[in-house]
Image (cartoon, rainbow, N blue to C red):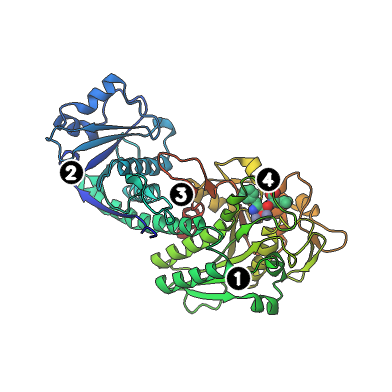
Amino acid sequence: MAKKAKRTIVTVSQVRLDKYKGDMLAVGLFEGAKRLPAELVQLDKTADGALKNVLKLGDFTGKANETAVLYTSGKVGCKRIMLVGLGQKDKFKLDGLRQSAGTAARTAEKLAVARLGLAVHGTGGVKLSAEQAGQAVTEGAIVGRYDYQEYLSEAKDNSQKDTTMRVTIVEPKASAVTGLNRGRRVGVVLGEGQNYARTIANKPGNEINPPSLAREAQKLAREVGLKCKIFDERKLSDMGMNGILAVGSGSASKPRLIMLEHKGRRTGNQKTGPDVVVVGKAMTFDSGGISIKPSANMEEMKFDKTGGCAVLGIMKAVAAMKLPLHVVGLIPSAENLPSHTSYRPGDIVRTYSGKTVEVQNTDAEGRMILCDALAYAAKMKPKAIVDMATLTGACVVALGVHYAGLFGNNAALKSKLENAAQVSGDLVWAMPSDEGYFAEMKSKIADLKNISNRKGGACTAAAFLGDFVGDVPWAHIDIAAVADTDAEKPYRGVGATGFAVRLVMEYLRSK
Ligand code: BES
Ligand code: ZN
Ligand code: ZN
């Protein structure tokens, strides 16, 4: 029987650290701290100096996400205290706090902790607002605890059991409680939006194909109150969305274009275009098509739908927060397979924009579906378009796994996204995609071709996309390297990461 997902419930409680009654209390310590921060002195006293002892012995150094569990003798309200390393104090960022909460929740789970107190914020005198701290800690716990286990018949250990964890943000000062709670409410929505995106993205290609992804979007829309429109293959053909159709032509699961819409209060009657259209690539599987990929690691190409899944997570969060904006989500979806009906190298496709594209490689399919969706988005005359796509291996080579590539035609929009990246922890690095790159995408026999040479592949791909948005401010985020991971971290499990949900939500909230 398929297992239910775990539940993480986060609350804020005004209580002294040594009085919190739970199964474990997590507190943060910076690397190399010689003395305990003021916030922990009382706890340490009640615990008969247990914290000081650990520091003295040198068993715990405070490196980022290092943990140590101490067992208390009964005077402290809580049976266990967990020390969580916050790393070097002068390098500490908001994401460090998010990670420390994730580490605490993931580690607690292995010990079957059902009630976890988090006092990692405010330890050590780092200046953060209570609201920022409450949000980051909440996100960290919810996202950190997540594991994809739908297809596991039985739990292999505690951390896989279908349990509910009650996480309490423990705060002795009354003055901080309101702010922490405000942040907590946002953190719950963003954390759950991100985990939802991860769950859809983690599902395999034999479950999620373009029609079943469209049904999932409809279900989401019903649940959270979004408008949802699905363009099936007949409609796509009527509209001339031949880029999406070409890519999907080799699969029995026909392509879809999924549209979700949120019209926030204050935007209800406006006649102008949307504030933002968010677009996400959803190749439910990318085999490369006739230009087939090597078989090693090809299974990872089920993650080629993560851009579209991020759009689902974003729209879920937008609806839950009732953002006072008009936001449209667009998800072009297809399955790229080789067959006797597939599109082929050499084909010339007339895309929705009217521009023709010579296909030189069927594995450069993301841009073929995105160009139709972007042209459609631009027609709505929005104030901005932001797209997310696992677009190129070249971006993985260029930036490695710590940053997504940020491209676009508008400096102000890019700068807003860079700021949102710093707050959300979904990091982006600005890359070029101007005329020089675009010139490389011109074909001798059509308006454009879908590949250039190997040089600067992420930049030429972005330049191709940029030709379909006209003069609408547009940003493109190449998430190929960051959308999924097989490297487990103390604060995060493997599989789809849900990258870009928090990033784009931070951008939308700060508009
Ligand atoms: N989905 C891939 C990009 C990708 C590669 C995502 C590795 C995640 C990890 C995309 O459709 C693709 O195959 N791109 C080609 C483009 C090339 C043919 C110009 C690539 O990057 O090799
Ligand atoms: Zn491909
Ligand atoms: Zn792809």
Left or right of 414 on screen, residue 160: left
Instruction: Specify whether 233 is left or right of 32.
Output: right
Question: Can residue 406 be seen by looking at this rendering?
Answer: no
Describe the element under mark 3 as helix, strand or loop.
helix
Contact check, label 3 and label 1, Cβ < 8 Å: no
Residue bearing the label numbered 2: 20
Mark 2 or mark 1, whichever is nearer to me: 1
Label 4 within 8 A of ligand 1 by Cβ: yes
Q: CA distance from mark 3 to mark 1?
A: 28 Å
Circle 3 or circle 2, nearest the eye: 2
Residue furthest out toward the top: 57
Q: The disc labelled 2 sits on which kind of residue?
A: Tyr
Mark carried by residue 257: 1
- Residue at the far left: name it: 75
Q: Nearer the viewer, mark 3 or mark 1?
A: 1
- The x, y position of residue 386, in whole percent, is 58, 60
Return the residue nearer the eye: 103 or 352.
103
Count of labels in the image: 4
**For the residues marked 2 and 4, what is the alpha-carbon distance in whole angstroms?**
50 Å
Q: What secondary structure is found at the residue carrying circle 1?
A: strand
Q: From the Cβ of disc 1, is ligand 3 less than 8 Å away? A: no
Mark drawn on residue 394: 4
Q: Residues within 10 Å of mark 4 (few under 14, many from 20)?
A: some
Residue 256 is situated, as x and y percent measured from the top left of the image, at 61, 71
What kind of residue is marked 3?
A: Ser
State how far apart marks 3 and 2 are (Cα): 29 Å
Q: Quadrant of residue 93 in the image?
A: top left
- Quadrant of image for the N terminus: bottom left
Work out whether residue 235 or residue 421 is closer to the camera in this orientation and state it.
235
Where does label 3 land, which residue?
424
Tell me residue 94's x, y (percent): 41, 42
| For the residues bearing labels 3 and 2, Cβ distance under 8 angstroms | no
